[in-house]
Amino acid sequence: MLTLLKLLRDGRFHSGQALGAALGVSRSAIWKQLQHLESDLNLSIHKVRGRGYQLAAPLELLEQDQLAASPWPVSIHHSLDSTNAEALRAVDRGVTAPFVVLAERQTAGRGRRGRKWVSPFAENIYYSLVLRMDGGMRQLEGLSLVVGLAVLNALRDVGVSGVGLKWPNDVLVGNKKIAGILLELVGDPADVCHVVLGIGINVNMRVASEVDQAWTSVFLESGAAVNRNVLVSRLNDSLLMYLKRHEVSGFSAIQAEWEQNHLWQGREVSLIAGVHRVDGTVLGIDQQGALRMRVEGEEKVFSGGELSLRLRHDS
């Protein structure tokens, strides 16, 4: 089925006879494969008598040779439950970190707090980088915020203006989400552990009725489709630079840059933790990446994976 998709990805018409000859199968077998492409991958295929079959839009796939300059080994998958889940399975199998897992689609993509991450085929980036951490807790301080900066700069490199950060793990354009980050850890954080840096970027997505929050994509912001191989390469380079800075100097060396790009700096917010809510004003972050807020005239610091930050209705 993937071989057929590669023949069709140029967006031109191809006759059933030519496709069958290229794959060494009958025209009826081609028809069945086309039906699977439509149902399994939710692709739109035009069928015109006398002309053949055509994808509704040209399709650009992730390609191993275009990512050959990656600083880490890369595996590309046609379909996964989630790249983070596959990355964790690879750690269990003994695959040596660092390495990157990419997928053309996810059937069970996850965001923070168990939310679904909508993952249509060949439209966005679903990316997980696995790192081995030997230096204890210091290397984990502010790590998700460091990843956010790397994603932000990769997006700027491909022409997305107005992009900024929201504590702790979101990348926004205005109030619309364009990327999200999910870190997962296995092992002993005080000794030796592996951390999975999961990144989802809306790249060429134009419609997504399942998304339950305001969102945007690189295409919607720039008006042009983006080569995802190019963006993955920019992301790799940006991550390598920021991770090295973090390893050498710690999060405190990056703290000011993160605050400069925080869209909600100085804003009136509500911090949600389960059924509890704290209202206050964002002051910034501390040297470990925790959120600093003024609450009833006092500065308080908050950190933790299950916290959610929202703008106050009267802000």
Image (tube, rainbow, N blue to C red):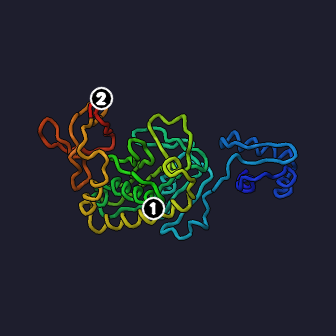
Q: Residue at x 66, y 41 (%)?
A: 42
Which secondary structure, mark 2? loop
Query: Residue 31's spot in the image, x, y percent?
Result: 81, 44
Query: Residue 153's spot in the image, x, y percent?
Result: 40, 59
Query: Residue 214's spot in the image, x, y percent?
Result: 44, 38
Relative vertical location of residue 245 with respect to residue 52 in this rendering, above or below: below
Q: Which callout, 1 or 2, points at the residue further toward the start of the chain?
A: 1
Amino acid at circle 2? Val
* Closer-to-camera residue (134/228): 228
Q: Residue furthest bottom?
A: 69
**Residue 219 can be seen in this image:** yes
Q: Are marks 1 and 2 in contact (CB under 8 Å)?
A: no
Which secondary structure, mark 1? helix
Badge 1 crowding class, 10 Å Cα cut-off, few under 14, some 14 to 19, many 20 or more, is some
Badge 2 crowding class, 10 Å Cα cut-off, few under 14, some 14 to 19, many 20 or more, is few
Residue 258 horizontal side relative to residue 121, left or right = left
Query: Residue 18's spot in the image, x, y percent?
Result: 85, 55
Relative vertical location of residue 31 with respect to residue 77 in this rendering, above or below: above
Amino acid at circle 1? Asp
Residue 59 is marked as none
Q: Which residue is mark 1?
A: 157
Q: Which residue is mark 2?
A: 275
Q: Residue furthest left?
A: 297
Q: Residue furthest front?
A: 223
Relative vertical location of residue 89 with respect to residue 45 in this rendering, above or below: below
